[in-house]
Image (tube, helix red, strand yellow):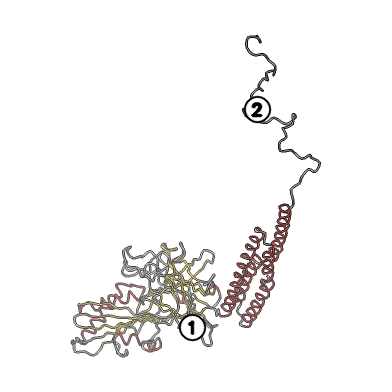
Amino acid sequence: MRVGPTFAILGLIIAAPVPSRGASDAAPLGRVDYLPYQVSVSVAFSRDTEITETFRRTVCSTLRTRLEQTFGATWIFPPGADVVPNDRLVPPNESGLERLTHSVAAEQFAGFACDKAYFLTVSRRGPKWFVSGREWDGTLRSLGPPASETTTDRGSVADAALAVITRIFSPLLIVDDADRDSKSAVLTIRAGSIPYGDPKFQPLKAGDILQPVFRFLDSKHAVRSIQSVPWTYLVLGPDPKNGRSQVRASVVSSYRAPLAANMRRRVEAIAVRVRPEFPATRLTLVAGKDPPQPQAGLFVTVSELAPGTAGGKSSARPAADSPRPAEAAGSRLLSDRYGEVTIPVDPQQPIVRLEVHSGGAILARRPFMPGLEPDVTLQVADDRVRLGAEREVDILESQLIETVARRGALMARTRAAIKRTDVSSAQKLLAEVDRLPPADEYLGQLNKIRVLALEEAHNRKDRVSERRIEDLCQKTLDRITQYLSDDRVATFKEEVAQLLNAKKVETQQLQAPMHRDENAAPREASAQPAANAPLRRRSPDELKPPAKKEPANRPTGAAGI
């Protein structure tokens, strides 16, 4: 398959840097919201028969006109800067943008001061034109991620380049004040009081996510170092505080006062808008520094921020029927042998909460925005000492459970033997209860585990592991005291002694002869009941009256009448 000729246009848009005295001092009337961006454009063209000098001049002039119409007075061109051709990018295409570094970009506009630089490349493949670009920021000394646009109209190349610039343009905001209690900050937008040429163009809107950066200055107010605030994000609020120049943002951070350094002298806190540029971020978990050790087998829980937390609800949310990644918020990942996990971007939840678990302990809890960088390293505490102590304690607790279960079974069998009057078996079972490991033996083993683990953690200067080991051993101590107390055995022995005594008395009563009255006369079998005997029920024969007896010499017949 043949590919059409490839053309590339390199656009370099440069804004003047903040002077070493600081942004607020260089601004008119000391207000950074009236400080415009000084811009210069440099365009590089690749060699091609269709790229003529007329086409170059047309693209440069059209792009400058579009920039003035869009940004208005917020962007100005200083002397010596303009939209001009540039042939320094090698190669002048997307590959050249990816290879571009901060120092190389700074060399291309060494003749004048620069704040921002936008490198654009325009390539044609067949009927389509591909426009790509990157932003260089002199204030933060950084290169932004690439962005691209496509068009099929040759005359719309400048418009596509403008679309790329407006997309990757990141306004600078100065952090004026931060409230630790309300987790909010007040920021001033650079050139925020200057209206844009296009009223519809608004580079900042509610819900945008900013990343704070510290600029450390020396005694001469020159930039000594630049450091981003780790695991901290600012989410713009819906309403500006003072017109359009000041905004209020919510602070999402794993630290209690992440912007406290801004209150010190010779420190400037600047925030810049960030957007996810990658579909996922590979997170590497390491412990230690010389060298860092990958932490395999750790669970990473990716969940949504708590309700009401800034960043959890964005004003610009996708439609409800938009696809949601299966690995999004609420997933549980396991680090591989290299200590890596892949966290995808969730459009509905740009900022998520990460929790790194090692067993029952939480090693790290961080807010995280996937997609900003392809690879991120998270240093967690070396948990080997605590894991070793937890392993030994688990073994001890398993032995404790077995002992408690055996003791309960022997006690039940002892009570059963006593009920069936098997005293010898009951005594044997009671002797087996006495031979079980007592609580003092388990307490000695637990104390040995605790002392050795605390000593190793103290040598490592790991106070977190020391506290966790103390809590772990205290819980095990409470279980030993609760389930393997010596008072239980003593109480059971008293109970057994009482049951044995009760059974002994009951046995003696059953085996003793019946009690008889030796003074009572023997009763004859044919003897009639005594007259004073109590009433008893008689038979019908006994209730009949006795028959009368006739005299023996009584005459019979008439003579006797």
In the rendered image, the vertical position of residue 319 relative to residue 453, given as above or below: above
539 with respect to 200 (left or right): right
| Label 1 crowd bin: few (<14), some (14–19), many (20+), radius 10 Å | some
Q: Hey, what amino acid is under mark 2?
A: Glu
In the rendered image, the vertical position of residue 91 relative to residue 22, given as above or below: below
Q: Which numbered tag is attached to residue 347?
A: none
Picture coordinates of residue 200 (x, y %)?
31, 66
542 with respect to 65 (left or right): right
Image quarter where the N terminus lies is bottom left
Picture coordinates of residue 317 (x, y %)?
36, 65
Q: Which residue is mark 2?
A: 542
Q: For the residues marked 2 and 1, what is the alpha-carbon distance in whole angstroms?
A: 112 Å
Q: Earlier in the sequence, mark 2 or mark 1?
A: 1
Q: Write the residue at 66% across / 76% down.
A: 445
**Residue 246 visible:** no
Q: Hey, what amino acid is under mark 1?
A: Pro
Q: Which residue is mark 1?
A: 294
Please tell me whether mark 2 or mark 1 is closer to you in this view: 2
| Label 2 crowd bin: few (<14), some (14–19), many (20+), radius 10 Å | few
In the rendered image, the vertical position of residue 361 relative to residue 488, given as above or below: below
Q: Name the secondary structure under disc 1.
A: strand
Residue 301 or 213: which is nearer the viewer? 301
Image quarter where the C terminus lies is top right
Residue 395 or 32: which is nearer the viewer? 395
Residue 130 or 88: which is nearer the viewer? 130
